[in-house]
């Protein structure tokens, strides 16, 4: 609550000396200094989630209700439009990415998601510095506010490369009339909010290439789910990401627990590995229809127990009716490598129903999943209901 109070106080204070603006319900609050050297947009969002899961026999049941996400966000520029910034804070407990090794992080809450400065060299070239999302798989880079289902898929959960601290380069170009984008990043490789150094001095190297055979999407629709803009012509985006994380100590690279193994003397020693990750993804939209698919693969340089490797793929389809109700279906398969202490491989079938009241800013979503696990006789059912609102 203290963070929200501080933001409100800041808005009131700055409003006295700045040009305050509230365009529409879906564009947040913004204000600009009288000399046009500073512009800030403030927004927030909340996801309230209720879920129920049970196996087919009904012997193992679990019910949860929580504030899944609560975010405060700010973006704009400082002193010149060339110097953009983005800030995002996570205030709900479920959203703060707690790790099990307190020696690797500070004792305080890990509320910082994004804190990045973006320098616009020109319209085609950008340099970023700070902590933010890596140019990874599309499902991860799409905001959790802009999803077609209650949450991302199990493929994303097991294989994504999330956020990291470092420097990124972004480039936009056209080949004839076809837009192309390129992103490259050199980062710490240990994920967000890490305060301890990597004793092995490994870094992470990420590159992503995207192309748009039929031209750009309306209002950057390649990075939000559902065809809310009802594309009048077919639009397609295809992306490929490769990430090499050298000497990482975490099970998934930028995510997961810090891996330690016990030696013959009973001492626990940190383990390091090189993780290579490949993503291939695509999104298609036309006249209310949307399709999205992703393939993910992680490989290790050393077979050390505790690190995640394997592959998975996810495909989903949705149709948005004229009354802004959407029905969607998703298939998810995760095949984790054997012999590394991996979790059970899973397959999920999900049906979703959403009502977009003000696009992704105010919506009600629900989905039901049928989940099968390797070598487990009973399958699981999961039902989720979520309300999202924000400005």
Image (spheres, grey):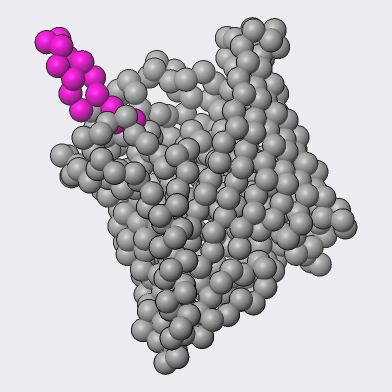
Q: Which residues are magenta?
A: 257-270
Side of 246 where 241 appears, left or right: right
- Percent position of residue 177, x then y: 64, 75
Q: Is residue 250 above or below residue 339?
A: below
Q: Nearer the viewer, residue 261 or 364?
A: 364
Residue at the limit of the structure toward the left, as seen here: 265
For residue 273, which quarter of the picture?
Answer: top left
Q: Residue at x 78, y 49 (%)?
A: 355
Q: Residue at x 76, y 57 (%)?
A: 357
Q: Residue at x 69, y 21 (%)?
A: 381
**Which quadrant, please, contains the C terminus?**
bottom right
Is any atom of residue 146 visible in this view?
no
| Total labels drawn | 0
Q: Is residue 243 above or below residue 231?
A: above
- Percent position of residue 163, x then y: 40, 49
Q: Is residue 351 above or below residue 373?
A: below
Q: Is residue 88 magenta?
A: no
Q: Nearer the viewer, residue 213 or 10?
A: 10
Q: Residue at x 37, y 52 (%)?
A: 112
Q: Nearer the viewer, residue 2 or 236?
A: 2
- Percent position of residue 78, x then y: 38, 79
- Percent position of residue 390, x then y: 61, 58
Side of 288 where 119 appears, left or right: left
Residue at the limit of the structure toward the right, as seen here: 322
Side of 390 where 246 appears, left or right: left
Q: Is residue 284 above or below residue 182?
A: above
Is any atom of residue 137 visible in this view?
yes
């Amino acid at each position: 609550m203290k963070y929200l109070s501080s933001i409100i106080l800041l808005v009131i204070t700055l409003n006295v000396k700045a040009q305050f603006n509230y365009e529409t319900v879906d564009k947040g609050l913004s204000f600009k200094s009288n000399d046009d050297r500073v512009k800030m947009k403030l927004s927030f969002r909340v996801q309230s989630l209720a879920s129920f899961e049970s196996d087919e026999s009904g012997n193992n049941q679990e019910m949860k209700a929580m504030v899944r996400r609560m975010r405060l966000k700010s973006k704009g520029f400082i002193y010149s439009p060339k110097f953009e910034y983005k800030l995002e804070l996570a205030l709900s407990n479920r959203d703060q990415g707690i790790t099990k090794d307190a020696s690797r992080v500070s004792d305080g809450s890990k509320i910082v998601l994004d804190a990045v400065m973006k320098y616009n060299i020109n319209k085609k070239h950008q340099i970023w510095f700070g902590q933010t999302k890596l140019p990874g798989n599309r499902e991860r880079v799409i905001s959790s506010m802009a999803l077609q289902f209650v949450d991302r898929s199990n493929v994303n959960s097991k294989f994504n490369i999330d956020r990291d601290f470092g420097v990124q380069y972004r480039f936009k170009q056209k080949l004839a009339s076809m837009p192309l984008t390129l992103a490259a990043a050199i980062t710490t490789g240990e994920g967000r909010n890490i305060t301890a150094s990597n004793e092995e001095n490994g870094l992470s190297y990420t590159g992503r290439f995207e192309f748009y055979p039929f031209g750009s999407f309306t209002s950057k629709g390649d990075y939000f789910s559902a065809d809310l803009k009802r594309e009048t012509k077919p639009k397609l985006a295809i992306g490929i990401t490769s990430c090499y994380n050298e000497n990482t100590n975490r099970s998934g690279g930028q995510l997961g627990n810090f891996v330690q193994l016990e030696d013959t003397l009973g001492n626990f020693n940190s383990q390091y590995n090189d993780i290579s990750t490949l993503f291939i993804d695509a999104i298609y939209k036309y006249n209310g229809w949307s399709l999205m698919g992703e393939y993910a693969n992680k490989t290790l340089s050393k077979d050390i127990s505790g690190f995640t490797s394997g592959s998975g793929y996810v495909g989903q389809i949705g149709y948005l009716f004229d009354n802004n109700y959407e029905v969607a279906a998703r298939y998810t398969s995760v095949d984790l490598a054997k012999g590394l202490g991996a979790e059970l491989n899973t397959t999920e079938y999900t049906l979703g129903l959403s009502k977009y009241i003000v696009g992704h800013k105010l919506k009600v979503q629900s989905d039901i999943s049928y989940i099968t696990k390797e070598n487990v006789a009973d399958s699981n059912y999961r039902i989720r209901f979520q309300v999202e609102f924000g400005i």
